[in-house]
Image: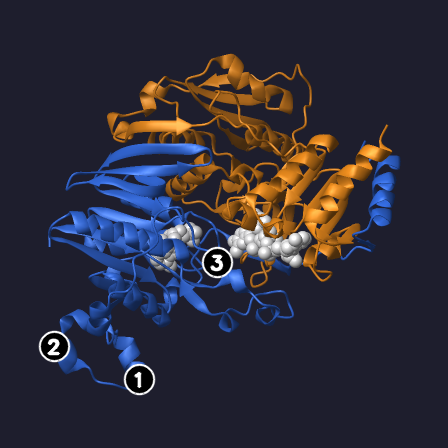
Amino acid sequence: MSFKIVVLAKQVPDTANVTQDAMKEDGTVNRAALPVIFNPEDLHALEMALRVKDKIKDSEVILLTMGPVRANEIIREALFHGADKGYLLTDRRFAGSDTLATSYALSMAIKKLWPVNLIFTGRQAIDGDTAQVGPQTAEKLGIPQITYAEELIDVDTSSITIKRRLDRGIEIIKSTLPCLITVNHSSPRCRFRNAKLVMKYKKATSMSELQDRNEDYYDLFESKPYLKIDEWGVEDINADIKWLGLSGSPTKVKKIENVVFKAKENLVLADNDNDIDKLMKTLINSHIIG
Amino acid sequence: MNSIFVYCELTEEKNIADVSLELCSKGRKLANQLNVPLEAIVIGDVDENIARQVSPYGVDVIHFAKDNRLFPYQTLPHAAIVIELLKNEQPQIVIYGATPIGRDLAPRVASALRCGLTADCTELAIGSHIEPKSQKEYKNLLLQIRPAFGGNIIATIINPETRPQMATVREGVMKKEIISNSYNSKISKIDTEKILKPEHFILQTIERHVEPQKINIKNANIIVSGGYGMGSKENFQLLYELANILGAEVGASRAAVDAGFAEPERQIGQTGVTVRPKLYIACGISGAVQHRAGMAESSTIISINTDPKAPINEIADYVIIGDVNSVIPKMIKFYKQNVK
Ligand SMILES: Cc1cc2nc3c(=O)[nH]c(=O)nc-3n(C[C@H](O)[C@H](O)[C@H](O)COP(=O)(O)OP(=O)(O)OC[C@H]3O[C@@H](n4cnc5c(N)ncnc54)[C@H](O)[C@@H]3O)c2cc1C
Ligand SMILES: Nc1ncnc2c1ncn2[C@@H]1O[C@H](COP(=O)(O)O)[C@@H](O)[C@H]1O
């Protein structure tokens, strides 16, 4: 197909619902105890990509994710919503990558898929809240970036126009292609799963998932190639291990602490005239107010 | 010795942004500790006197790029200038505001220089580190301290091997401190013609509406803050009334902002502003870690909540168990009665 749209998405622990059980004694997070989800803003990125696909004939949406084999779950999810194809970057040597090493691996995978016309990412992933992987991937590919995209205004085969959300306003920017766009949570939510696509892709799977389940899908992939989720390792994307994993990551975690706020000794008051009158007098007399 | 750099951004009114001045103040302290110069980068279409707004905060050298194509901010030309400058100057530390501009620019620069970058730091310090495996000791590293995992943990991040060490810091986290109004900064002009190429300007701005900053709760002495428990935008009026008589600003939790009760500029917490007022009155706020991260250092905290077990109460000095709609009018009434 002629027009390629890549969506970068990550499977993340659901940090909005971290319970006490998920915190280990030493203050680190027990990732295994957390449910994993499709990074919320990446679903917005998928939606914007699908809207481009709706507008451009002969275009395809490819989901690319780097993570453990389990991350195939988000590839299947993307297929249910309308993506055409998924690639999983998985290799032990990717483990421990910071945003710089992650963007290197993703950019090498995108180069393998080249020519690519558009790349969409979420603004940030909720496990780190760094918002770095998008711009870093754009830099590595030598293409422009538009961050905080809120609305797709227009797109054709040679340019895209995007409305960006800033702290106190908006900007409408037009870029030539290829271009990388990071998508904000203020953009439209992802469309619903499509029942037909769920039926079609329910069994989409990768080689290592099959091996884990001890199944032989050779015949299946032969007859229904669209069910195959491709897995790529370091060699498949021609990456240099020097720039990957822990050794390719300039940032190191020195220390992690559990957040503990010291409980103060406090004065508990009731909602009556007497208590509130007294409180206001105390605050005035100690010159905190007045 | 290798310097510390601060990337300074311009406001809509073309002044140096507050967050950049705050970072110059922090940069000055780090520079004193390391005994190195503090240098600033100012890029825009402004005059030299605007660039000099950073001087009183103790900046030794201002790298200044003036070009009418450089305002408003655009990624590619600003990144090209910063990357070129950092390659030549080789600073050991570079800090940026964790603003839409800083968070757009810094990762692009970090990727080009293949250096580390830590987003949204809440504290920066100088310290040493011993690598557990090799027992190798690293001295005078930048300790980049930030909340992680949705605010549930605080992580200290370092870049032992690569330079520069880079970080972004949110507005209001560092304090602005004038060293001397006559501090002498040297201006070093950047030749933009040599750096900028036509391909840096392939993005076209078709439309742009950015409001000047009107609300600034960061420097308020007293903050009356409302949460989801306020119930509605109309009920927020009660907070404005109380704030008005106390000479206070109105703040909000993210749940209140998301519900449309208050403007995003009023949000306090990990993804909003950090405040340390003399008095913080939390009205109908539960006190999630992400909210407390932005206000726990207030001198006095009052919590008004129907739930005696709300986590905010743990860090409050005064806890009023009750409905905001009944408690706040009483506070207004008795304040007026008691103050002469
Ligand atoms: C990555 C991340 C970043 C975040 N950043 C921030 C941030 O910067 N700032 C922030 O604030 N939050 C932030 N949050 C959200 C945070 O986790 C909480 O969801 C939010 O702070 C809750 O707001 P709230 O206390 O107003 O609402 P709720 O948790 O719904 O609490 C409402 C409170 O009001 C009380 N109440 C109800 N009715 C009344 C009444 N009539 N009178 C008195 N009391 C009443 C209730 O008892 C309750 O305690 C973040 C979350 C994540 C995951
Ligand atoms: N491991 C990954 N695989 C695919 N995309 C990723 C990965 N990590 C980050 N991204 C993309 O980059 C965005 C920003 O991530 P971050 O810089 O971690 O906040 C995310 O919203 C994703 O779109």
Task: Write down the chain letter for disc 3.
Answer: A
Write down the residue under mark 3. A127
How crowded is the residue under tag 3: few (<14 C-alpha within 10 Å), some, or many (20+)? some
Chain drawn blue in the picture: A
Report the amino acid beneath label 2. Answer: Glu
Chain drawn orange in the picture: B
**Quarter occupied by the C terminus of chain A:** top right
Q: Nearer the viewer, residue B200 or A39?
A: A39
Write down the residue under mark 2. A222
Q: From what the image shows, is residue B253 above or below residue A75?
A: above
Which numbered dot is residue A213?
Answer: 1
Q: Residues at marks 1 and 2, common chain?
A: yes
Which residue occupies the extreme bottom position in the image?
Answer: A214
Sequence-wise first label, 3 or 2: 3
Task: Write down the chain letter for disc 2.
Answer: A
Q: Is mark 1 within 8 Å of ligand 2?
A: no
Sequence-wise first label, 3 or 1: 3
**Quarter occupied by the N terminus of chain A:** bottom left
Report the amino acid beneath label 3. Answer: Asp
The residue drawn where x is 54% and y is 70% is A30
Sequence-wise first label, 1 or 2: 1
Q: Does residue B265 show up?
A: yes
Q: Position of residue B258 (x, y in %)?
A: 50, 48
Q: Does residue B270 show up?
A: no
The residue drawn where x is 52% and y is 73% is A33
Q: Marks 3/2: CA distance?
A: 38 Å
Q: Is mark 3 within 8 Å of ligand 2?
A: yes
Which numbered dot is residue A13?
Answer: none
Report the amino acid beneath label 1. Answer: Arg
